[in-house]
Amino acid sequence: MNATALSIALFILRIGLAGFLLLWSLDKLVAPEGAMAIYQFFYHVRITTEIAYVIGAFELLLSLTIMAGFLKTYSYGLGLLLHVTSTIASYQQLLNPFGGNHLYIAAIPVLAGFIALFLIRRQDTLWSLDAAWRK
């Protein structure tokens, strides 16, 4: 694979993963009661509406930072950590992926994408603020 194709592929992966995280963050801001139910069910933690908004705002900032390719070691690493945490929290649904649990299977390729992007983050230079900053 040539350098141009790799740059384009990594850009697409970065935008796709950031978009995925962006939708989850917007969901917390638009419908915080959903986030409250998720935290109670999967993490056994009760959060308030205000905390759901704070988490949503943090994830929004993180998703935009990933989208911009800025502070890649930290932003990609934190995005990976968040997704690893949510994937582990839903392990029971992943172990029984049929019926109502089939949508949880999507966590696996998303996790693979986050891992891949983190591992080769230094090659992710197309329209990346880190790449522009280092020139």
Image (cartoon, rainbow, N blue to C red):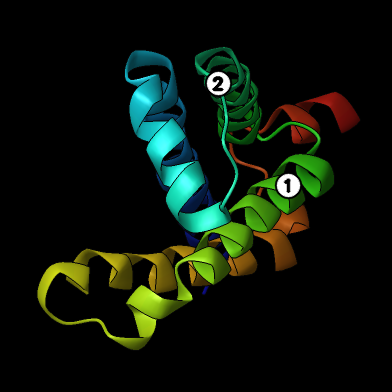
Q: With respect to residue 89, does 32 lie above or below?
A: above
Q: Which residue is rendered at x = 82% and y = 43% of the image? A: 74
- Please count the marks in the image: 2
Please give the label number shown on residue 48: 2
Q: Nearer the viewer, residue 70 or 98?
A: 98
Taking the view exactly as shown, the residue that stands out farthest to the right is 134
Expressed as whole percent of the image width and height from the top left, the position of residue 112 reads 51, 72
Expressed as whole percent of the image width and height from the top left, the position of residue 101 reads 22, 71
Q: Secondary structure at mark 2?
A: loop
Q: For the residue carrying disc 2, how many other residues have a C-alpha within 10 Å: few (<14), some (14-19), or many (20+)?
A: few
Q: Secondary structure at mark 1?
A: helix
Q: Can you tell which quarter of the image residue 103 is in?
A: bottom left
Nearer the viewer's eye, disc 2 or disc 1? Answer: 2
Q: Which residue is rendered at x = 70% and y = 60% of the image? A: 118
Three-letter amino acid code at the position of disc 1: Leu
**Lower sequence index among marks 2 and 1:** 2
Circles 2 and 1 in contact, beta carbons < 8 Å: no
Expressed as whole percent of the image width and height from the top left, the position of residue 110 reads 44, 63
Q: Nearer the viewer, residue 76 or 41?
A: 41
Residue receiving disc 1:
78
Expressed as whole percent of the image width and height from the top left, the position of residue 12 reads 43, 48
Q: For the residue carrying disc 1, how many other residues have a C-alpha within 10 Å: few (<14), some (14-19), or many (20+)?
A: some
Image quadrant occupied by the C terminus: top right
Q: Is residue 32 visible?
A: yes
Q: Nearer the viewer, residue 102 or 52?
A: 52
Q: Nearer the viewer, residue 116 or 20?
A: 20
Three-letter amino acid code at the position of disc 2: Thr
Q: With respect to residue 59, does 51 lie above or below?
A: above
Taking the view exactly as shown, the residue that stands out farthest to the left is 99
